[in-house]
Image: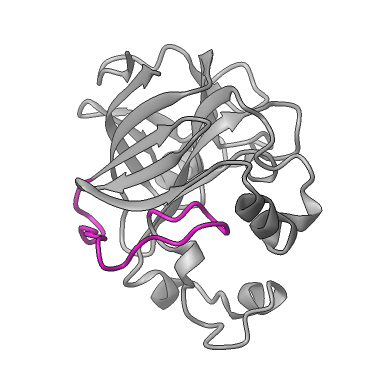
Amino acid sequence: MTLFDGSSLDGWRAYNGKSLPPGWGIVNGEMTFSTKMILEKDYSYKGSRDIIYGAREFDNFELVVDWKIPPGGNSGIFYHIAEGYSGIPEVAPEYQLIDDAHYTDFHDITAYNKSLGVTVNPHLLQPLQSTGADYAMYAPDVNQKVLHPAGEWNTTRIIFTEKEVQHWLNGKLIVRFEPWSADWQNKKVNGKWNLAPDYGKFKKGYIGFQDHGSPLWFRNIKIKPL
C-alpha cells in the first residue's frame, strides 16, 4: 500500500488538524518540509507541524520509507499515533532520524541531556537519541548500523508485531525488542517517558513524520498491513 507516490499528498494532514500545515509540500516528486516556505508563507501558524497519514490507522505493519535530512537535521517516524494530545511524542513511539555525525555542531543539547540525568558527555548525542533508535527507549546496534551522511538518502524499514518490533536501516537490522514487555515497561517508567502515562500504550494508530525545525525529504513511502 503506497502512502506517498510522488504526485499526491492525499490522506496527509497536520496532527490534530484537518489539512497540511505550512511548510509541507511536493518538490521534484519528493515529500518535503521547507523552513524557507514557512518564512515566506505562514510563519504565524500555531498548529502542529508534525503530519500524519490520517486516512487509515494501522496495528501490525511493515513500513518502508526513503528519507534525507540536511547537516544538523532532525526528524522522526512515528507510529500508533493517537490524536487529542498536545504533541505526538508524548503518546507515539519514534524511529529517530538525525544527523548523528554533526547534530551537536549546530545545536547545544547539554542542558537537555542534563535534564534527563546524563552526566557523562552531556554535550554529545546519546545512543538513545541517534538515528534508528526507538527514541529514548532502545539504542541501535552500532556494529550493524550503516548510516549515510546528511544530504544523502537512507532507507528505513519498521516491522511491528505484538511479539517483536524491528528497526532496519539501509538493509541492516539495528533494533529489536518486544513491545509492552517487562523490559519495555521498565525502560518507560525509568526514562524520559515516566511522566507520559499514555506513551506507547496504543496498539493501533496513525503513521506520522516529525517537524523538528530543519528541511526534510521523504519518498517511496509504502506500508504493508501484517
Range of residues picked out in magenta: 132-154
Which residue sits at x=40%, y=69%? 103
What percent of the width, then of the height, locates residue 105? 40, 77
Say whether residue 20 is visible: no
Residue 133 inside the magenta-drawn segment: yes
Question: Please, which residue is most extreme toward the bottom here?
Answer: 120
Q: Say which of 33 and 169 sits in front.
A: 169
Camera-side residue of 129 and 185: 185
Q: Is residue 156 magenta?
A: no
In the rendered structure, the answer to whether residue 180 lies left or right of residue 168 reads right
Position of residue 193 relative to residue 125, above or below, is above
Query: Closest to the observer: 130 or 36?
Result: 130
Image quadrant where residue 62 sits = top left
Which residue is pictured at 20% across the width and 58% down the height?
Answer: 148
> Residue 81, image x and y in percent?
61, 30
Q: In x, y percent, where is residue 126?
A: 49, 72
- Magenta stretch: dominant SS? loop
Is 155 on the left-hand or right-hand side of 224?
left
Percent coordinates x, y for residue 15 in the rendering: 62, 28
Horizontal relation, residue 169 to residue 3: left or right: left
Residue at (46%, 35%) from the top-left corner?
A: 23
Residue nearest the observer in this picture, 154 or 47: 154
Q: Is residue 178 above or below residue 9?
A: below
Residue 68 appears in the figure = yes
User: Would you place residue 35 above or below residue 126 in this image?
Assistant: above
Q: Quadrant of the N terminus?
A: top left
